[in-house]
Structures are given as structure tokens and as C-alpha cells.
Image (cartoon, helix red, strand yellow):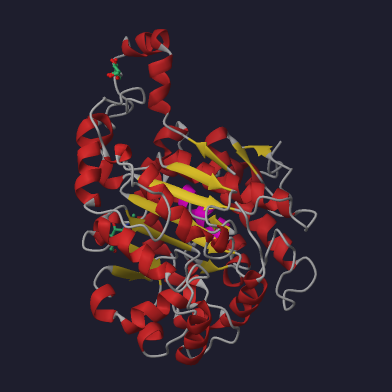
Amino acid sequence: MSRAKAQTKQSSYISRDSSRSYFLAVFVSMVLVFVICSLTETLPSFQNRISTTGADTCNGEPPAVNRTHDPKQATFYDEPELTYTLGKTIKDWDKKRKSWLNLHPSFAAGADTRILIVTGSQPSPCKNPIGDHLLLRCFKNKADYSRIHGYDIFYNTACLDPKLCNVWAKVALIRAAMVAHPEAEWIWWMDSDAVFTDMYFKVPLQRYKQHNLVVPGWPDMVYEKKSWVSLNTGSFFTRNCQWSLDFLDVWARMSPRSPDYKFWSETLMSTLSDKMFPGADEQSSLVYLLLTEKKKLGDKIYLENQYDLSSYWVGVVGKLDKFTRTEADAEKNLPLLRRRRAEVVSESVGGVWEKYLENNTASEGKRPFITHFTGCQPCSGNHDPSYVGNTCWDAMERTLNYADNQVLRNLGFVHRDISRGSYVLPLAFDFPSEVLQRKKSGEEYNR
Ligand SMILES: *[C@@H]1O[C@H](CO)[C@@H](O)[C@H](O)[C@H]1NC(C)=O
Ligand SMILES: *[C@@H]1O[C@H](CO)[C@@H](O)[C@H](O)[C@H]1NC(C)=O
């Protein structure tokens, strides 16, 4: 993403801050688990039938995890002083997590790349009449992405720390999730209004071997411009390790949990070049920590800008039709992309897409991985006044349908008009080639 684009974000971020600062988000929780392999544990006869076809494991993935195996040996869970809350240190976490994995070998296999996506929204109904609908669709989008890639997902609507029922809620949630999910190497926070728009892109975890926190950002905007929008905490991931536990505590010392909250608010206002509204928010605080502790933190925090972990929606929505055309071209040229396949192996086309798009589109023509509806505030409806009328809601509808088409394809359907979510058509076999031929011969696009 270009720097120019990042700068255009400022106006909307500012209003995000102002409305966020009094936005009381209190969070009840529910867990969705998508491990298809585990089904076979509860359905032995089904497994037997599958076995006769020679498929003992699901497509060469690590063997199914054992969700009933929890040996009696003591783990960190048995320590009376263990807490899930910020501000209470856990010592030797890396060792403790490793011991737990050793006692749970089915989870140890594949632990290095295991991701838990955490997200959430406020506990009460949305003021915006379509707010709850939009949040549901945003969650569906994340559930689809998680299922396709075999990630677990946690949606939180409870306030885990009474002082952090606001933009800081994510920090308390990540802390609890790290302890609750020793099987996951990475905890990936997504704002409720961030949407996957490339369902087949996977984050290149091998790139972050030396890092513990990955956040979209631009080093020159952090260190030279000292801008509070030099990075974006709407979508970032942290490694489940001692460093991250300690870092979350350092970070939260600037939050409303801290007796020095007012001091931090003033310090951020005077240090950051473009922060207009008081209140130490979590994003500005992270920029400040990088600025002041570059030596200690800079090595472990990866500012990612080679792909879009949080693309500003205004620059995306106008390009959705172009992306759709590029994708239709790709399908026309590469029969592999037109082939029908089971959803569980749909990840196999990911690399093919990447290569095709690399060769055939300028980088700015590539669909972003994640599109973030910054400034839209779908739940409260108090969007940035510069987005007139229904701009935000129409943009969300179109973007969600655009993303949904990548999912529906596996089910044999398509939203032909991404402005109208309820309207789908069966996808013709070998789409689009047959469709294009029919079009040429004057037949209807879709019957
Ligand atoms: C899972 O663990 C339980 C308890 O240790 C054990 O009885 C069961 O056989 C294990 N299941 C598999 C599939 O290994
Ligand atoms: C992309 O371009 C490179 C260099 O021209 C070529 O070697 C490669 O085969 C192309 N890949 C695809 C998928 O078209």
C-alpha cells in the first residue's frame, strides 16, 4: 500500500478516534471451532467408512487433534497464581507452554503455524438499525476465511477488563487468549469492521521467524513523521510467547488501566505530529513505544507493508468491479481456477492466484488481503460525516458480497450483482468460459 494512501486515512481515523473514545464496548464469548478432522472422533462408523477409501487423515494434514486427551500431570493451569488478566506476570511462559504441548502431542504437531483469530464487538444491540446485520456479515466473512484455512476463531462480546471496554479491549482479550490457547502460536486480532477480501491469501509466517508482533505499518512514517496513523492496530498478530505477555503489559501501562493515563494522553498529543484528539488510544501508544523504545522493541515488531493487512476501504470499493474482471480473465486463462473442487482443498488455488495476479496486474490493481471500514462505525452508525448518506453501508455490502463470491464459488453460486446480497445465481460449469461462449452466441448470461 502506498504512503499517499495511508495519508488519506488521517481524516477518517481522527473521527474514528473521537467516536471511539466514548464508545463503550463491553464484551460474552463464544467459540467456533472448525476442525473437520475432529468430527471423525465422534463418528466412528463414519470414519470406518472413510477409511475403506484409504483416507486415514484429512488430506495429508497432521493427524486429527485429540480433544479428549488431557493427562493428569500438572501444567501451568494448576498454578494457583495463574491469571488471565493484564498486569500479573507469568514467568517462564515459553517453557510452560512447551510442557503443555509435550503433554498434548496431537496439538504439538503443527503448533508452529497454528493461528487463532480473535475478534469481537459490543455486548448490547447496535444503535444503527442495520448495524447488527453488518456485524454478522463481517463475522461470517471471518468465519469463512477461518474455515477455509483451518484456523480457529473466537468472537468476544464480554468486557474482560472493566477499564478497557473501549479500543483497548483487544489487549485484554489477547492476553486471556494466549493463556487459554497454548496450542496456538499466533493470536491474530481483527477489528469487527475489517473484512477479508482475498479469501485465498495466507500470511507468510516464515517471514516472521525473528519477530513476535506483526502489524501493518511504514517505518518512515513511524520514525520520521511520528504519525499516529503510521501503523494500524485494526489487524495484527502476536506470537504466543513470553515476550508478547511482557509486551502487552508494557503497552497496557498507557491505557485507562494506568494511574498515569492522563499523562500518557498529553504525552502522545505532544509527541505525535498529527494526533488531534486527547486520550491515549492503543494505536498511538504502539507508535509511541516504537519511537521511544526502538532498540528494545523494533527488532521484534515487524511493520508489514508488502501486502494489505488493513487496507483503507475508500481506495478499495471503486476497484471491486476491476478486480472481478481481472479474476474472470484469470479463470478464462487458467482452467485450474475454473475446476470444481471441495472447499476443504480450495486453499490449493491460493498460489496460482498469486502468480497470475503478480504477472497480470499492476500492484495497485491487486485485490487487498483485508479491507478495513475505518471511520464507518457500522454498529453505532456515527460514521465520519465526510462519508455522505449510505456510502459506508453500500460500500460494506458490495465488499462483503465481493468477498462472499470467493466462498460461494465452492458451493456453486455467485452474486452476479455485488450490490444486492440476497440475489445469487447458480454458477455455470467451467465458469466463465462456457458463459463467455454463450454470451458470444447471443444466449443469456445465466439461465
Ligand atoms: C484421545 O485421548 C483419549 C484419552 O487419553 C484416548 O482414550 C483416545 O484413545 C485418544 N484418541 C485417539 C484417536 O488417539
Ligand atoms: C509470470 O511471468 C514469469 C516471467 O515472465 C514467467 O516465467 C511465469 O511463467 C509467469 N507465471 C504465470 C503464472 O503466468
**Residue located 29% across and 55% down the image:** 205
**Residue located 61% across and 65% down the image:** 373
Does residue 158 appear to the left or right of 251 in the view shown? right
Q: Position of residue 64 (x, y in %)?
A: 32, 26
Does residue 23 appear to the left or right of 110 in the view shown? right
Does residue 42 appear to the left or right of 142 in the view shown? left
Rendered position, 180 above or below 412:
below
The answer to whether residue 248 is visible is yes
Q: Position of residue 289 (x, y in %)?
A: 37, 78
Query: Quadrant where the C terminus lies?
Result: top right
Q: Position of residue 387 (x, y in %)?
A: 72, 74
Q: Is residue 172 magenta?
A: no
**Numbered range of the magenta stretch:** 323-331
Rendered position, 359 above or below 83:
below
Q: Residue furthest front?
A: 80
| Relative depth, front residue between 234 and 59 | 234
The answer to whether residue 430 is visible is no
Query: Quadrant where the N terminus lies?
Result: bottom left
Characterize the magenta stretch by its predominant secondary structure: helix
Q: Position of residue 52 (x, y in %)?
A: 32, 9
Looking at the rendering, the quadrant in which ligand 2 lies is: bottom left
| Relative depth, front residue between 331 and 215 | 215
